[in-house]
Amino acid sequence: MQDSVTVRMAAPAEQIWELVSDITNTGRFSPETFAAEWVGGATGPAVGAKFRGHVNRNGWGLKYSTVCRVIASEPGREFAFIVLGPGGMGINTWRYVLDAVDGGTDVTESFELSKTLPLRLYWLLAGRLRGKTNREGMRETLNRIKAYVEAQ
């Protein structure tokens, strides 16, 4: 019910963090989330800030929006948020961890589904396919970010 992908980028961690923590950039890099905006008076990536993400699930036309809450926001190191479900229940945590290395930054994107019974059943039934889709999507997102920051 979790996975991650790491891509090395020839750019400073602070520059990459600025991109991933500005959720208005999400549509530029993600193959599924085509837009996002801050909500509830939030204007930036502070812990507790909320935003709405607009998703085209699997690229085959199922479009919906979700509200997310920032749970980690450490410039140059980490940005994470949890997707909220009915009643504000956490469904899925998405995280970017940035590790400075010689000549650049290792960027790890990960997801982890909450360990509720409905999500465990979902993972049992669709986990292999959805996990593959998430892995490919994370790799595509990170490679798009890499291309952008390395062209700067």
Image (cartoon, helix red, strand yellow):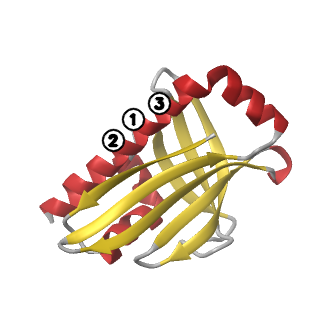
Q: Position of residue 80 (x, y in %)?
A: 56, 63
Which residue lies under the disc numbered 3?
133
Residue 65: quarter of image:
top right
- Between residues 109 and 24, which one lies in front from this camera angle? 109
Q: Position of residue 36 (x, y in %)?
A: 52, 52
**Residue 136: image tag:** 1
Q: Quadrant of the N terminus?
A: top right
Q: Give the residue at the far left of this rendering.
A: 151
Residue 144 visible at all: yes
Answer few, some or many: residues within 10 Å of disc 1's Cα (few below 14, many 20 plus, some between 14 and 19). some
Which residue lies under the disc numbered 2?
140
Disc 2 marks a residue whose amino acid type is Glu
Tell me if residue 32 comes above or below residue 102 in the rendering: above
Disc 3 marks a residue whose amino acid type is Thr
Badge 3 or badge 2: first in the primary sequence: 3
Tell me if residue 12 comes above or below residue 22 in the rendering: below
